Amino acid sequence: MTEALAEVAQWLQDARSVLVLTGAGISAESGIPTFRGKDGWWKNHDPMELASPEGFARNPALVWEWYAYRYHLVEKAQPNPGHHAIAHLEERTPAFLLLTQNVDGLHRRAGSKNVHEIHGSIQRMRCTRTGKIYHPTDVPIEPPFPLKTPDGDLLRPDVVWFGETIRMDAAEAVEDFLATHHPDVCLLIGTSALFAYIQSWSLRAKYAGARLVEINAERSTLSGMADAFIQQQAGTALPQLVEALT
Ligand code: NAD
């Protein structure tokens, strides 16, 4: 184990409160492509066509084909050692909150409990007319696309697209956690941290006394602010950290 990892393990060992913020990088080792990385979706796809209300209005069948492909990829995928390590960390930490930008549900499948999905879930659909939520058990995610409710109303994935508001229940959970539990450590894992709310939560935790620890395969916008920047794959670094805890 590197010296930096050993130091972070000591911080986690002593922490009574931990906030974890994850992005697409935590699921990369489960075979789910990130968005912006070198193998990311946006290398070959236009985000505005596939992940915006305007793109959906123009071509709902195309958007559904892409989501169906990703839904089935996620269904076949398994949580990786990084997801499992985060679930173990939750078990041993008195106050713990995990905020993920991912829509894949892999944290829950790994056993994480206090998880908040700020960008929604690929496992849910929403009626564009009534707002009612549907699951793949109600409407299978299979052609023909676009998917519709049994009444014939257009369904959309229950995820947050570009230009849309984040999930307020998840945002409020983080705000409450910061105000009530004053994290000792904030772990930022596998995210390019381009969204203002991710930057804001990380820095507010830090300036209120948390050690800001980043685990990322590459540098992000926040690496320079981190108290420890671990440039490793999450699935390698996180299990080592958790194994070092007594
Ligand atoms: P992003 O694609 O912008 O950034 C991914 C980050 O992960 C990069 O900084 C990259 O260096 C890092 N990374 C890649 N592999 C890694 C690994 N093995 N270990 C550690 N770090 C690794 O993704 P983002 O920051 O999450 O933000 C964009 C959006 O992506 C989010 O809104 C999210 O909804 C969406 N998204 C979700 C999924 C998913 O649910 N699995 C997949 C792709 C994108």
Image (cartoon, helix red, strand yellow):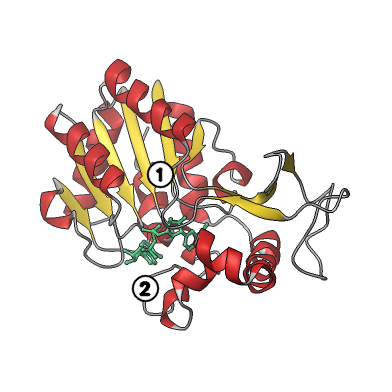
State yes or no: discs 2 and 1 in contact (Cβ < 8 Å): no
Between disc 2 and disc 1, the foreground one is 2
Q: Is residue 95 above or below residue 239?
A: above
Q: Is residue 48 above or below residue 89?
A: below
Q: Is residue 1 above or below residue 172?
A: below
Residue that extends furthest to the bottom in the rendered view of this protein:
44
Q: Is residue 61 shown to the viewer in this render? A: yes
Q: Quadrant of the N terminus?
A: bottom left
Question: In this figure, which residue is indicated by the disc labeled 2?
Answer: 37
Expressed as whole percent of the image width and height from the top left, the position of residue 48 reads 45, 69
Expressed as whole percent of the image width and height from the top left, the position of residue 227 reads 13, 45
* Residue pictured at 19% horizontal, 33% vertical: 204
Q: In the image shown, does 101 or 25 lie closer to the viewer?
A: 101
The numbered mark, 2 or 1, whose residue comes first in the sequence reads 2
SS of the residue under disc 1? helix
State left or right for residue 24 relative to residue 218.
right
Residue 95 occupies quadrant: top left
Looking at the rendered structure, the kind of residue marked 2 is Gly
Expressed as whole percent of the image width and height from the top left, the position of residue 78 reads 63, 58
Q: Is residue 32 shown to the viewer in this render? A: no
* Label 1 packing within 10 angstroms: few (<14), some (14-19), many (20+): few
Question: In this figure, which residue is indicated by the disc labeled 1?
Answer: 243
Is the distance from the Cβ of mark 2 to the nearest ligand 1 atom less than 8 Å? yes
Expressed as whole percent of the image width and height from the top left, the position of residue 9 reads 27, 41
State left or right for residue 105 relative to residue 137.
left
State left or right for residue 150 relative to residue 132.
right
Q: Quadrant of the C terminus?
A: top left
